[in-house]
Amino acid sequence: MAAGAGGLVAAAALLLALAGPRPVPAELTDGNSEHLKREHSLMKPYQGAGSAAMPLWDFQDSTMVTSQYVRLTPDERSRRGSIWNRVPCFLKDWELHVHFKIHGAGKKNLHGDGLALWYTQERLTSGPVFGSKDNFHGLAIFLDTYPNDEATERVFPYISAMVNNGSLSYDHSKDGRWTELAGCSADLRNQNHDTFLAVRYSRGRLTVMTDVEDKNEWKNCIDIAGVQLPTGYFFGASAGTGDLSDNHDIISMKLFQLMVEHPVEDESVDWTKIEPSVSLLKSPKDNVDDPTGNFRSGPLTGWKVFLLLLCALLGIIVCAVVGAVVFQKRQERNKRFY
Ligand SMILES: *[C@@H]1O[C@H](CO)[C@@H](O)[C@H](O)[C@H]1NC(C)=O
Ligand SMILES: [Ca+2]
């Protein structure tokens, strides 16, 4: 009986190995330029002869473009600024590298409010969430530099991710705590060296990494699975200041296409119709080993059913053989004792 159960366990493991999702490697791209998507990227020179950036990006509110950076807000109170890519993104798997600089005269905690990176349906809509619209549709990554929630035990600046289908509102007084999917602290303000952030979205897995310590390496910040985002949304960046302020500068935003295989089932899905959402059935910790999340674990397809039956059959055969051997042994032993 024990051997039979072992056979079934082995069969189940085999089934998982054959039918289960394959893990996505954790390391990010090395910036391989052949997959750089210029139509979704913002790089120097931003304007002037031979520059492609200006027709591809819109700049709004306090945003100021210089030869060296795009300043979303100056270090002045009550400012908002944003930049938005004009071209909707139809890539299923992508990685965004953002070179940014947040700096100002404010000491200790007397600076704010921070910067947001967006992949949303809406574009060019000013609002209270780091200079952009609340109740958005899509993904936001917040680089929050000021702890509005005085009771927080978190260390700021704090990076967090939020996915919204338009129903959720960002609560500034709690630094977005109730709508946050995951986050980390990062010492990214007033640095003398370059600071970078990477956002990767692939097969339902959202990864955010930072490079803010002048070590020229990515450090993990956010890694969650089960994130559903449609294609056809827009990339953007925005920033806001209130009573407290900072310069919020974007030096570059580079979008890379990731070459990732998708299961054949994906071809029947209209990716532009996907509702932004996150599977909350698993904790982020558990999500790490399951890059596909709930979205792909649909009904069993024909070959999976076949594998399942095959494994069950194998299990039964193992049970039968073991049972027969045990029975025979016992018979022989019985013979000897008679
Ligand atoms: C939007 O999200 C909320 C909460 O996350 C959920 O209750 C609601 O059903 C969603 N709406 C749609 C249209 O999916
Ligand atoms: Ca805040």
Image (cartoon, rainbow, N blue to C red):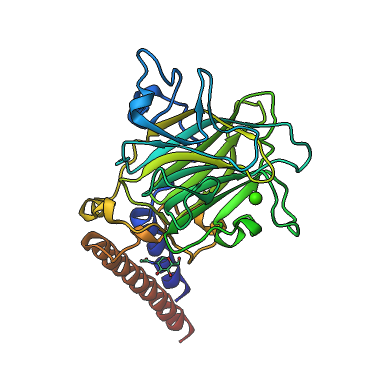
Farthest residue toward the bottom?
338
Q: Is residue 181 above or below residue 281?
A: above
Residue 169: x and y in percent read: 51, 61
Answer with the quadrant where ligand 1 appears in the image.
bottom left
Quadrant where the C terminus sits is bottom left
Residue 331: x and y in percent read: 40, 80
Nearer to the camera, 338 or 104: 104
From the viewer's perspective, tell me whether residue 20 is left or right of residue 153.
left
Judge whether residue 24 can be spotted in this image.
Answer: no
From the viewer's perspective, tell me whether residue 141 is left or right of residue 104.
left
Q: Is residue 97 above or below residue 300?
A: above
Q: Residue at x 30, y 45 (%)?
A: 232
Judge whether residue 224 can be spotted in this image.
Answer: yes
Residue 265: x and y in percent read: 24, 55
Nearer to the camera, 284 or 174: 174
Q: Residue at x 61, y 32 (%)?
A: 74
Q: Is residue 45 above or below residue 183?
A: above
Q: Residue at x 28, y 66 (%)?
A: 299
Q: Residue at x 39, y 64 (%)?
A: 12
Quadrant where the N terminus sits is bottom left
Residue 275: x and y in percent read: 35, 59
